[in-house]
Image: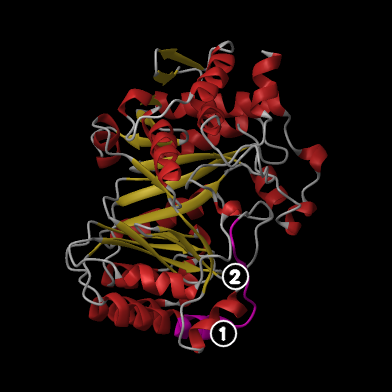
Amino acid sequence: MNSVLTMAERSVPRYTSYPTAPHFSAAVGPQSYAAWLATLSKAETLSLYLHVPFCTELCLYCGCTTKAARRRAPVDAYAEHLAREIDLLGAAIGGQRVVHLHWGGGTPSILGSDCLIDLVDRLAATFDIAGIAEHAIELDPRRVTPELAAALARIGITRASFGVQEFSPRVQRAIGRIQPFVQVEAAVDTVRGVGITDINIDLMYGLPHQTIGDVIRSAELAASLEPARLALFGYAHVPWFKPHQRLIEDAALPGAAERVAQMRAAADTLEECGYVPIGLDHFAARGRDMVRAARVGRLRRNFQGYTTDPADVLIGLGASAIGLMPQGYVQNASDAGSYTRAIAAGQFATAKGHALSADDRVRGRIIEQLMCDLAVDLDATEPPADFSAELDEIDALSAFGIVRREGRLVIMTEMGRPFVRLVAAAFDAYLPKHRARHSVAV
């Protein structure tokens, strides 16, 4: 058991991409992005992600690229530059078909109802969005009003994702996010009342002063709202990267054994409530599209987490947003100032990226398949590759009961599901050479 806990404390990426963002470089810039866009064919479908890096106030646990906006002017200015970036994309790839649209942050609704409507109208005038399969937005339950809900319905939102994290008042005080259950329930009812019935709820374990009883109660309360999906994330304490997290005392955080126990207790509770575990940290109601996608091997993973998004290309708009082109990854400047200056100058705000090699593509497919399907057949890789050293590492991990292999078929055990990032890391060619500081495995 102690060995398993040691593994839980290992620092590994979340693998929402491969290579992961710390390995992006300035070798890919605005000119590279423009050239890559120019090669897209009209047959290729798009997924659009719009990042809004502002919140009304900053929660202490937050690891997102965002900041508190105390004045309206920076938000309005940012929205104007998002509109200009849409125009830049329109000049390059206007008319392309969009199948998924996702608003993230931050708190995207801080833009306001009129601004959201204007931006979606601009997207509709720039791209073919008539056949969107999913239009999702991340919401703060404390900021949902009937007016906002009406605007969300007006722009065609089909899925609302609520950041809940934990319902315990004690833990909420410790993380600077007070939102009683009745407030969350009212927010969910408000968006359902305008026809947005696909609800996602995010929960967390490993928070300061959190107990096993807390996570069980929070999982039960979240399930009582009957969301289509739930996500169960481990709190990533990275104060060297997010300085505001220094306000959370290390002594208040649960240790490795408690984190693992909290994760298992919450997962067991959600399964007892009828939810199907998906990949590493998602749960879906039976009969939903994510369950079907996982069953037939169509589940995918990107910077929004697990998704059923079938798009060929991911386009990121806004500060820090990441896109995936056939040639590789592109990321906009992370700070809003650098982003807006680039867009105001009439050029893309690409600050870094990564051109994929043939080896990257093979390893990326293996890692994504492990993260999504919890198994991968190395004999099915194209082109065939040796992976002897990687299999030696898998064999070492198998001694702890988290993974097994049958020849070159690598299979996560049910006990090993929470440790899938460790197994994926065995195929990460960049990790041994440049160990960025990541969050713990569980």
Secondary element at tag 2? loop
Start-end of magenta stretch: 64-81
What crowding class fits label 1: few (fewer than 14 Cα within 10 Å), some (14-19), or many (20 or more)? some
The label nearer to you, 2 versus 1, is 1
Residue depicted at x 60% and y 28%: 262
Quarter of the image for residue 159 reads bottom left
Q: In the rendering, at what x and y percent does residue 319 appear? A: 53, 71
- Locate the C terminus and report the quarter of the image it occupies: top right
412 vs 250, left or right, is: left
Q: Verify whether residue 127 appears in magenta.
A: no
Image: 225 above or below 60: above
For the N terminus, which image quadrant?
top right
> Of marks 2 and 1, which one's residue comes earlier in the chain?
2
Judging by the rendered image, the residue that carries numbered circle 2 is 56
Residue 77 on the magenta segment = yes
| 65 up-or-down from 399: above or below | below
State which quadrant residue 254 falls in.
Answer: top right
Residues 76 and 335: in front is 335
Query: Does residue 436 appear to the left or right of 162 in the view shown?
Result: right
Q: Would you say residue 377 is visible in this rendering?
A: no
Q: Are marks 2 and 1 in contact (CB under 8 Å)?
A: no
- In percent of width and height, residue 63 lies at 62, 54
Residue located beneath label 1 in the image: 341
Choose between 381 and 293: the one closer to the eye: 381
Residue 73 lies, in percent from the top left, at 57, 87
Identify residue type, mark 2.
Answer: Thr
In the displayed structure, 311 sits above or below 125; it is: above
Residue 305 pos. (x, y %): 44, 47
Residue placed most toward the observer, 98 or 202: 98
At horizontal 25% and vertical 41% (from top left) the residue drawn is: 289
